[in-house]
């Protein structure tokens, strides 16, 4: 009897049980750790952007890493329950990868769940043994040929979770089904994730050259990918869990939950959390005004809590958006503010600004 297909929040579908790495990811509790941008494969659908591809860089949630201190900071900022080690191919720099896994387990404990993605090209017994001894909990293969598929069998000799993660390419049903059946022939495979194919700035040109199209003007998902994944789910009868992960899940569930989780920890007292973003006001003063004096007046005369004010560089004051909105007339007329900008930004490294509104422009 075939396992029942369950629909998950975000438009994903599942037969069986999600691996722990996926459960943590859906909670937004997984540190994304790019240990290198280098890879020996040449997948035309690779979504890794040009700034990272082929580069000898290390990123923890987009934070450039030069020492383990940066990893500790990012794990703390989001109260991470685990880490997803990716690339490139982490096995191209296996000793560096092993060192970070070892340090993560030592610093965050054995329950800190770590999974790793690899093509399998360099997954020989020696490298697999190093990863296992370091404490890796879960390894996910995306093989490009039969030789790399055989390395999956070597991974099954160790006591960890072994699975696969592949894109659902619309015109490759035969190849996908054949691979799933190969996995089914192996004793100990626990799962396979089928990811919806989607376009990014990094792979758009290559996908268009292959004749693929978007499902709509406002989506990056490729037409036919989801349909094929659901068809395979319905037709399959496998000994392991099969999961279709939609592009919407990655954005609306995984990424958004990670933002919300991080925002709760890193927000300043005057920053409001709104759908995972941080909202605040920036008051820009003319150079002849002294920001320290303005802050004192706001506290003494207008009874603004001192925790809701922060002096920044370039003669700017940060505060809660609603305080700036209520006092905008005072700020513009008495203190001659050049502008008051409501800022919407991600709570991640670099505080990327998603949107902003000028109260000066709105008042015209």
Image: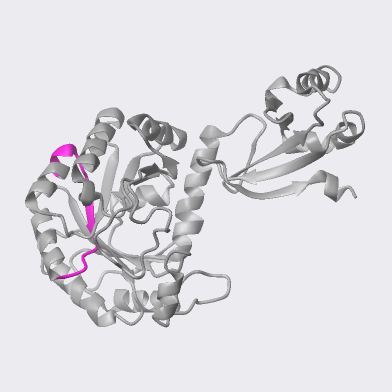
87 on left or right of 145: right
Residue visible at 56% across and 41% down in the picture: 351
207 on left or right of 42: right
In this rendered view, identify the residue nearer to me: 256 or 169. Answer: 169
Task: Indicate whether residue 136 is drawn in magenta.
Answer: yes
Residue visible at 80% across and 28% down in the picture: 287
In this rendered view, identify the residue nearer to me: 5 or 208. Answer: 208
Q: How many marks?
A: 0
230 on left or right of 40: right
Q: Position of residue 61 (x, y in %)?
A: 43, 44
Q: Position of residue 247 (x, y in %)?
A: 45, 64
Residue 172 picture quarter: bottom left
Residue visible at 41% across and 75% down in the picture: 207
Q: Can residue 124 be seen?
A: yes
Q: Can residue 10 be seen?
A: no
Q: Is residue 169 above or below residue 260?
A: below
Which region is colored magenta?
Answer: 132-145
84 on left or right of 362: left
Task: Indicate whether residue 297 is drawn in magenta.
Answer: no
Residue visible at 72% across and 20% down in the picture: 306
Q: Is residue 334 above or below residue 159?
A: above
Q: Position of residue 326 (x, y in %)?
A: 84, 36
Q: Position of residue 314 (x, y in %)?
A: 71, 31
**Scheme of colours in the image:** one colour
Indicate the quadrant containing the N terminus: top left, top right, bottom left or bottom right: bottom left
């Amino acid at each position: 009897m075939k396992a029942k297909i369950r629909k998950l929040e975000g438009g994903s579908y599942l037969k069986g049980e999600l691996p722990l790495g996926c459960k943590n990811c859906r909670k937004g509790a997984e540190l994304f750790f790019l240990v290198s941008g280098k890879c020996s494969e040449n997948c035309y659908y690779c979504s890794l952007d040009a700034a990272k591809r082929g580069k000898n860089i290390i990123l923890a949630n987009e934070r450039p890493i030069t020492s383990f201190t940066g990893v500790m900071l990012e794990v703390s900022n989001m109260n991470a329950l685990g880490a997803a080690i990716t690339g490139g191919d982490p096995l191209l720099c296996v000793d560096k990868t092993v060192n970070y896994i070892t340090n993560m387990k030592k610093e965050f404990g054995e329950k800190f769940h770590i999974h790793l993605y690899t093509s399998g090209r360099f997954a020989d017994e020696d490298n697999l043994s190093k990863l296992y001894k370091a404490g890796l909990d879960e390894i996910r293969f995306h093989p490009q040929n039969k030789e790399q598929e055989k390395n999956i069998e070597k991974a099954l000799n160790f006591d960890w979770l072994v699975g696969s993660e592949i894109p659902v390419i619309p015109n490759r049903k035969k190849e996908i089904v054949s691979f799933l059946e190969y996995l089914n022939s192996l004793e100990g495979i626990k799962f396979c994730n089928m990811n919806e194919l989607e376009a990014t700035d990094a792979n758009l040109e290559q996908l268009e050259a292959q004749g693929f199209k978007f499902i709509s003007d406002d989506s990056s998902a490729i037409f036919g990918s989801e349909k094929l994944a659901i068809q395979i789910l319905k037709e399959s009868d496998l000994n392991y869990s099969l999961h279709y992960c939609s592009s919407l899940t990655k954005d609306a569930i995984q990424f958004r939950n990670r933002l919300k989780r991080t925002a709760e920890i890193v927000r300043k007292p005057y920053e409001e959390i709104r759908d995972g973003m941080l909202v605040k006001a920036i008051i820009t003063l003319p150079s002849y005004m002294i920001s320290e004096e303005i802050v004192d007046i706001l506290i003494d005369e207008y009874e603004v809590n001192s925790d809701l004010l922060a002096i920044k560089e370039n003669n700017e004051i940060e505060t809660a958006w609603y305080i700036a909105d209520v006092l905008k007339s005072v700020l513009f007329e008495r203190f001659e503010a050049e502008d008051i900008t409501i800022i919407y930004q991600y709570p991640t490294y670099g505080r990327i600004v998603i949107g902003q509104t000028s109260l000066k422009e709105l008042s015209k």
